[in-house]
Image: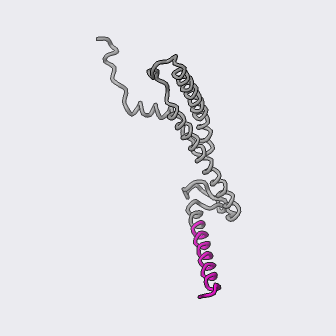
Amino acid sequence: MGMGMLQQPPNPQQQQQQQQQQQPPSPLDNISKIKTLVGPLRESLSNTIKTAAQTLNHNSQVDAGSLKGFDVSIPRFDKNLEEFYSICDQIELHLKTSIKCLGQAESSNRYLHIPVAPHRSENLGINENMLTYPQFLATASAQVAYAKEIHDTLVAAAQNISPSD
């Protein structure tokens, strides 16, 4: 028995903390998520094209009769294509979300001239010219209720104006 055999295995909590420290933090905004998906998208496209080429080559050899049977294992084209489309769908989702966020920010700047604090906490010493997040939610709820009330009033007025049978 050597001295190396007496070492205790590392503590599982220490291993988990080391793994957490090694992993970069996940991006929070949609544009950063899109940027992180560009690399896998390129790799997936490359794999899809390579698999398509291998499949075509294999099929042409079988058709020419130079290759007997299907004993050669080649990657499945449909799986690589599905992975490529999956990444494209994720990017599309993040782009649509980004567009909606920009639209909401533009509407907020147009209709609510007071800036909103980016944090939910009220004890950050926010100045008087900023709305806290709960105040912003209350303001938005009041605006939605007011818009619904106007809509309902216009619908009722339109029904009163229309001739009855």
Front in this rendered view, residue 48 or 96? 48
Q: Is residue 58 above or below residue 20?
A: above
Query: Where's residue 108, x and y in %?
Result: 66, 61
- Which is the main secondary structure of the residues drawn in magenta? helix
- Residue 98 higher or lower than 116, as above or below: above
Give me the residue at 59% from left, 41% from top: 88
Magenta span: 140-165
In the displayed structure, does residue 13 sit left or right of residue 42? left
- Report the residue at 53% width, 23% height from top: 63
Residue 108 in the figure: left or right of residue 69 = right
Q: Is residue 13 above or below residue 9?
A: below
Question: Is residue 146 covered in magenta?
Answer: yes
Query: Residue 28: percent from the left, percent from the top?
Result: 57, 45
Q: Position of residue 38 (x, y in %)?
A: 61, 36
Residue at 58% over, 72% down: 145
Q: How many marks?
A: 0
Locate the N terminus and report the quarter of the image it occupies.
top left
